[in-house]
Amino acid sequence: MIKTGGYMPIVRLLLFLLISLLFSLVAAAEKIENCKWDNRGGIPCISVSKTPNTSDYSIDGINKTIITKEEIIKSGAIDTIDILKSIQGLDVFQSGQKGQQTSIFTRGSESNHTLVLLNGIPINDQSTTDGLHDFGQDFIQTIQQIEVYKGANGAHFGPSAIAGAINFVTDIEYKNSFSVSGFDEKNNSINANYTKITENDWHLNFKGALNRSKTDSAIALGNEDDGVKNHQINLNAKKWINENLKLKSTIYSRKTKADYDDSATKEADVTSNNEMYAIQTGLEQKTMNSEGMLALHYHNYDRKYNIQGKRDIYYSESLVTKGEKKLNYNKKLSFGYGGEYKYDWGHFNKKSWVEQTKGHIKNFGIFANAGYKFNDDQILSIYSRSDDHNTTGQNQTYKVNFLQYLNKLKFGITHSTGLRNPSLYELYGGSSSYSGNTELKPEKSSTNEIFGEYNISENIKFRSTAYETEINDRIELNSSWSQYENKLLNINQEGLESSLNISGNKQNISISSNFSKSRNDAGGHQNRRPDLSYGVNYSKSFNDDRFGPFDLNMIYKYTGRYRDWDGSGNSFQKSTDLLDLSINKNWYGSTITINISNLLNERYEKPATYTQDGRQIRFGFKKSF
């Protein structure tokens, strides 16, 4: 139950943010020039997402990878896994084919150490046992942009960003279109985008998608086919109140129904129905020297699993209000400040294992940052955040970054911290054999990074990042399996990520490598953390005499051997070579696509005992209007 007193922090925070925002609007007398944020005339724009708790002079020190809508389309991606599996430093493990449960390990950390956000607001499902996000439920067609942040990012995003964060951006796409793709009547996708600018200058956008897939059994050597159906709807609206202020809202929903295998003896009549709904609305303000935002957010998860007649039900809700202000004080100093209140509640009744939980979590965070330019070549950035949690109390995270520019070289050093508060289940859940623990402390991390970026020439850039992370106070069941507790056993991670980017002559090639080591205090390998991966992304625009102009995109990734549970014990699994190829051609105002995933027809299990798709060829047609 929600106590009346729980609303008072929300009221105080709303009053603080509203007063701050109104004061800034009254004080802002400057007018701004039309830019990417101001497209009231219906000019197609690129999504611009601002990293929380940053300011103008500290942006260059953020480790941020952006995957744009254009890159998503050219890759031929169907779900988020198709995109994220190619990102350096992310290891993706999906228990079968599309629609199956999926975990991501960022830089060798735990799968629940990556915070997931929708337009900068956390959306990790609090009804899961340990608070991890199931990426297998997220398809890609209605997402406008994906952003990946690696490293401890607690000062930017708050709790759960121990290893990093992944932000899904929804926004208006101004090119109306309809597209279909697939390879048979059971494996296909349909999606549409439509935008209208009304006479009173409302920008209204609709995105919708339907995906169907039917492939082999999720479990290796299974005896039945498994499949998935996914529906997505995204509604976006913008309204410029004046040149400095706009209203922005989004409604996002997705529903994924999947057949899956609970075990080798439980294949038939095992299904899941995973639904997620979110609504956001808020104000964004911009002047020549400042930016501000105020957002209200609500989302819920409704998950149901049928396991041969036994019905497991999971439900959770979140209410978030967030606001922040960024200012350029002078030519040397920029700073920002803000706050976020998040209220989570949920419950589940798991009859297949006789487990249940019910409870709520409250967290109030305040944050601030400053960027100082000693000169044009040296920048110091400091970020801090304090979170007040209803069971773990007050905890602080921070980040310090120093940048040095030396002609064509950019060099940086970063120290950052992160934390993960216990989930609802770890606090209040339980079964007949073990129980939650309201005395748990948060898991915490400390990360050091050093990176360099060298522009070898106008078209060639090399970047390398070395990092080390220590995670302590891990939350696990105790040795008697009777209650959750904070373990003294730590995880130590270290790695080297490098990339070489070459562009020019209507082509681009990116070569990347990742050497990573994730070990416990005893020196043992962490499961599902390969030590080595490397890959190549290549894209080129051709103009052939016979076929005319067309675009080619190729993604190759090698993943080395890793340790995993094979059903009887831990053993090392085989390495994989995965190659995806896509071809896009404009044809009389339409686009024809051919996408080949797993071109080499690699047969593998990732994780062990769960088979993955072999080679698939999809044909697509897109009409813009």
Image: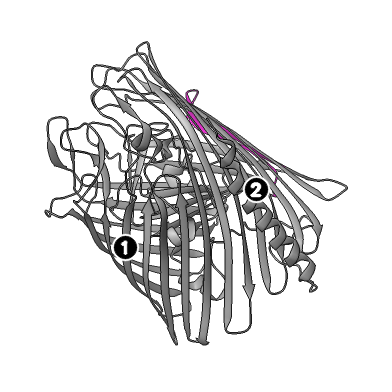
- In the image, taking residue 131 as reference, residue 383 lies left or right, namely right
* Residue 175 image point, x, y percent: 69, 48
Q: Residues within 10 Å of mark 2 (few under 14, many from 20)?
A: few
Confirm whether residue 139 shows in the render. Answer: no
Quadrant holding the C terminus:
top right
Asked whether, in this view, residue 571 is left or right of residue 342, the answer is: left
Frontmost of labels 1 and 2 is 2
User: Which residue is drawn at the image coordinates 42% and 40% (left, top)?
Assistant: 135
Circle number at residue 446: 1
Dividing the picture into quadrants, the one containing residue 235 is: top right
Q: Of residues 75 and 55, which is closer to you in this image?
A: 55
What segment carries the magenta color?
174-194
Secondary structure, mark 1, is strand
Determine the secondary structure under disc 2: helix
Q: In the drawing, does residue 403 fall left or right of residue 334?
A: left
Q: Residue beneath label 2, please?
A: 11
